[in-house]
Image (tube, rainbow, N blue to C red):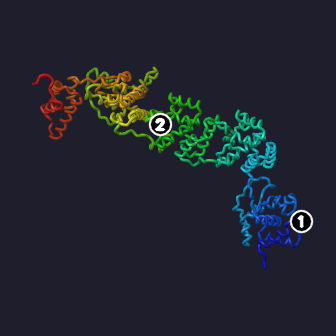
């Protein structure tokens, strides 16, 4: 009857146990070993000898190192060394496994028969080689550092013994890149020992590990004096690892951690795959990751090397996402990594419909000195990102008061978001925008004095003249904004004058809805008024020709400021609104025109801010005659003169008569007679029947 696998092994074990590996050429042991070789498809009797011993011990639940195998056979460990190649062959075939993969010294490695091999033997099945399914594990940099850590954590190992161990272990692994590269830059064995320990803490915590400075030095050195000297050299920067830029001390002086250069030396070819991955991001997830890093503990602003680490991290993230085309454009115009980091954070806020507080964000990004320097640059509007028209400072108002935020400009949105930019660019409300091309030409009639003033303003607003004026004002150090106040009786042509200036100069009009500028909610009105000027500034940047910001019936918000003694909260709100407008007019870079029927209601503080102040009188008789002739072509000179003389109408009131006459002509098909025109004039006033000027006919 043919023997089973386990029977072959039992016979072989009985012959080999305590055999001292002698008399192996005997007939019985030879047959037993050949049976094992054939049954397991082994390459040699040496493999059969070692497998038999390991299987025997594994069935008892034990793993064996070379010393255990020597004891099994009753021989010396030196005798077993002849069988190391056979042992490695068994491991490669998957019949034997090493149970302690981090141990690099062969004499201390432990082995046992694999579960797969044991199962096959018990079931009397010939095992297949499972090389393809075995992870071929070599002793690598991680095992090396783990081995060093085990020595450091062993209380029975002195510092001197530790360094001797490292020297010996490095000699055994001279081909390892970690050992070779570290020895090339660090000659001190104690410094290398510390580096290996920091590396272990780094990867043991999934790439986020730090080493506690105090406890690490305590574990390494039993002598207090040595600990203190090492600590001092690390803190004052004279330590070899600090000098080589491989490690750094945290801002709170409690931890020691790898620099980017240190990580690269340790991780080698694994550098790009270890830790958090930043590749494959899109333009939205990229800026979010930048924000997450800046706001994380990893960016420690108190660390003297914080900005160096930030620069390296930003470059790493950008290099990992070269497919985002806009990143290269940003790098071309913003060479400073900290500026780019802040820009990306503002982009993230924009993408989420949010804003960032400038003071809070600078606090996250910089230490105190750099923070204050950058804050001053922003306040003076001299920061590089402002000069490049990438960001703008905007003052927001909330229940808790005002705060300053950073927002992307439209130029920046187009630069970073590219085809998605239109999702974030604020569109001007059509009710708010009056395009110059939509304004119809209209003849206006004024007195000689008024016409002279109006012509001067109209000529000033012609683009060539306007640009020359602005340059001249800048050279003289004067305010370059053009503010115009048009005041006088209703219907005298104030608003229409603005319309015709806009048409003639090719300027669109941003028409402010005064009623919308006042909100019932506390703090909202101020925010709305601020928003008016913010949108106007954006329109100025977008437009090749600066538009006109028009406040019609401006006395509603340009009114006199209230005395706050015992005043109401609404009075305070109105005062705040007026202060906002005064401040914005002071730094105006554009054209603001305000019209009002009630000039006496304007606060005196507004007077000096208006470059032009033009009073519109009720039209003269001559002007009214020309209006009648221009608007009703069928009138005779005499009838036009009489209407101008008899009725003290404004231009707006004459327009009303003309509109009603036109309606009658459309309905009746006949141009109204002068008598009907007279009747319409008499019906114009609603307070009482209109009384003609002078004597009745």
Please give the label number shown on residue 409.
2
Q: Position of residue 99 (x, y in %)?
A: 74, 58
Asked whether residue 569 appears in the rendered view, the answer is yes
Look at the numbered disc 1 and give the secondary structure of its residue: loop
Residue 167 vertical placement versus 303 (above, below): below
1 or 2: tag closer to the N-terminus: 1
Q: Position of residue 359 (x, y in %)?
A: 52, 33
**What's the residue at 76%, 37% (across, down)?**
224
Apparent side of residue 40 relative to residue 548 in the rendered image (left or right):
right
Is 492 situated left or right of 3 in this image?
left
Q: Position of residue 285 (x, y in %)?
A: 54, 46
Disc 1 to disc 2, C-alpha distance: 88 Å
Comparing 179 with 498, the one in front is 179
Position of the C terminus, as image quadrant, is top left
Identify the residue at image location x=71%, y=42%.
Answer: 215
Residue reaching furthest to the front: 566
- The residue singled out by tag 1 in the image is 22
Q: What x and y, as percent, mark residue 120?
A: 72, 69
Nearest to the observer: residue 65 or residue 81: 65
Label 2: element kind: loop
- Considering every residue shown, the one lying at the far right of the view is 23
Residues 98 and 542: in front is 98
**Camera-side mark, 1 or 2:** 1
Who's the residue at 68% across and 44% down the image?
A: 264
């Amino acid at each position: 009857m043919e023997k089973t696998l386990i029977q072959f092994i039992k016979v072989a074990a009985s012959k080999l146990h305590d055999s001292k590996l002698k008399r192996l050429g005997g007939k019985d042991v030879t047959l037993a070993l050949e049976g094992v070789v054939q049954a397991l498809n082994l390459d040699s009797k040496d493999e059969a000898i070692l497998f038999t011993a390991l299987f025997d011990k594994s069935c008892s639940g034990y793993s064996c190192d070379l010393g255990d195998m020597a004891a099994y056979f009753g021989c010396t460990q030196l005798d077993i060394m002849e069988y190391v190649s056979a042992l490695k062959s068994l491991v490669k075939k998957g019949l034997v496994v090493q149970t302690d993969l981090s141990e690099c010294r062969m004499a201390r490695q432990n082995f046992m028969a694999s579960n797969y091999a044991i199962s096959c033997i018990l079931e009397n099945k010939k095992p297949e080689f499972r090389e393809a399914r075995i992870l071929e594990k070599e002793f690598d940099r991680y095992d090396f550092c783990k081995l060093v850590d085990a020595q450091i954590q062993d209380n029975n190992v002195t510092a001197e013994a530790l360094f001797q161990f490292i020297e010996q272990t490095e000699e055994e692994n001279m081909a390892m890149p970690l050992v070779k590269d570290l020895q090339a830059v660090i000659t001190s064995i104690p410094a290398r020992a510390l580096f290996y320990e920091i590396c272990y803490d780094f990867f043991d915590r999934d790439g986020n590990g730090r080493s506690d400075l105090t406890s690490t030095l305590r574990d390494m050195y039993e002598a207090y004096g040595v600990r203190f000297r090492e600590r001092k050299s690390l803190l004052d920067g004279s330590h070899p690892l600090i000098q080589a830029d491989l490690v750094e001390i945290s801002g709170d002086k409690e931890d020691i951690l790898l620099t980017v250069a240190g990580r690269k030396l340790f991780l080698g070819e694994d550098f790009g795959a270890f830790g958090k991955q930043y590749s494959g991001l899109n333009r939205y997830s990229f800026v979010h990751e930048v924000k997450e890093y800046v706001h994380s503990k990893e960016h420690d602003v108190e660390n003297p090397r914080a900005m160096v680490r930030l620069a390296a991290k930003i470059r790493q993230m950008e290099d990992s996402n070269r497919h985002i085309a806009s990143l290269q454009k940003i790098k071309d115009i913003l060479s400073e990594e900290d500026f780019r980091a802040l820009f990306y954070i503002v982009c993230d806020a924009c993408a989420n419909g949010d804003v960032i507080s400038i003071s809070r964000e600078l606090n996250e990004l910089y230490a105190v000195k750099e923070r204050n320097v950058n804050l001053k640059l922003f306040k003076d509007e001299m920061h590089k990102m402002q000069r490049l028209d990438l960001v703008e400072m905007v003052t927001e108002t909330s229940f808790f008061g005002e705060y300053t935020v950073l927002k992307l400009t439209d130029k920046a949105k187009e630069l970073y978001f590219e085809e998605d930019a239109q999702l974030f660019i604020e569109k001007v409300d059509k009710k708010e925008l009056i395009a110059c091309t939509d304004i119809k030409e209209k003849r206006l009639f004024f007195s000689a004095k008024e016409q002279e003033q109006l012509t001067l303003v109209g000529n000033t607003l012609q683009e060539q003249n306007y640009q020359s004026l602005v340059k001249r004002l800048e050279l003289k150090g004067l305010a370059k904004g053009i503010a115009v106040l048009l005041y006088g009786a209703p219907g005298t042509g104030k608003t229409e004058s603005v319309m015709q200036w806009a048409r003639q100069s090719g300027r669109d009009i941003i028409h402010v809805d005064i009623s919308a500028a006042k909100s019932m909610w506390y703090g909202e009105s101020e925010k709305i008024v601020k928003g008016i000027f913010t949108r106007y500034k954006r329109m100025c940047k977008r437009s090749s020709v600066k538009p006109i910001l028009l406040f019609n019936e401006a006395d509603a918000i340009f009114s006199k400021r209230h005395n706050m003694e015992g005043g109401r909260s609404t009075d305070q709100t109105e005062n705040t609104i007026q202060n906002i407008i005064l401040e914005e007019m002071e730094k105006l870079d554009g054209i603001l025109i305000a019209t009002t029927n009630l000039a006496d209601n304007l606060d005196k503080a507004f007077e000096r801010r208006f470059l032009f102040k033009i009073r519109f009188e009720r039209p003269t008789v001559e002007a009214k005659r020309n209006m009648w002739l221009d608007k009703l072509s069928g009138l005779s000179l005499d009838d036009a003169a009489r209407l101008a003389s008899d009725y003290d109408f404004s231009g707006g009131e004459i327009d009303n008569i003309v509109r009603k006459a036109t309606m009658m002509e459309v309905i009746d098909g006949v141009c109204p007679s002068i008598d009907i025109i007279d009747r319409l004039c008499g019906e114009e006033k609603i307070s009482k029947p209109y009384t003609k000027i002078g004597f009745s006919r």
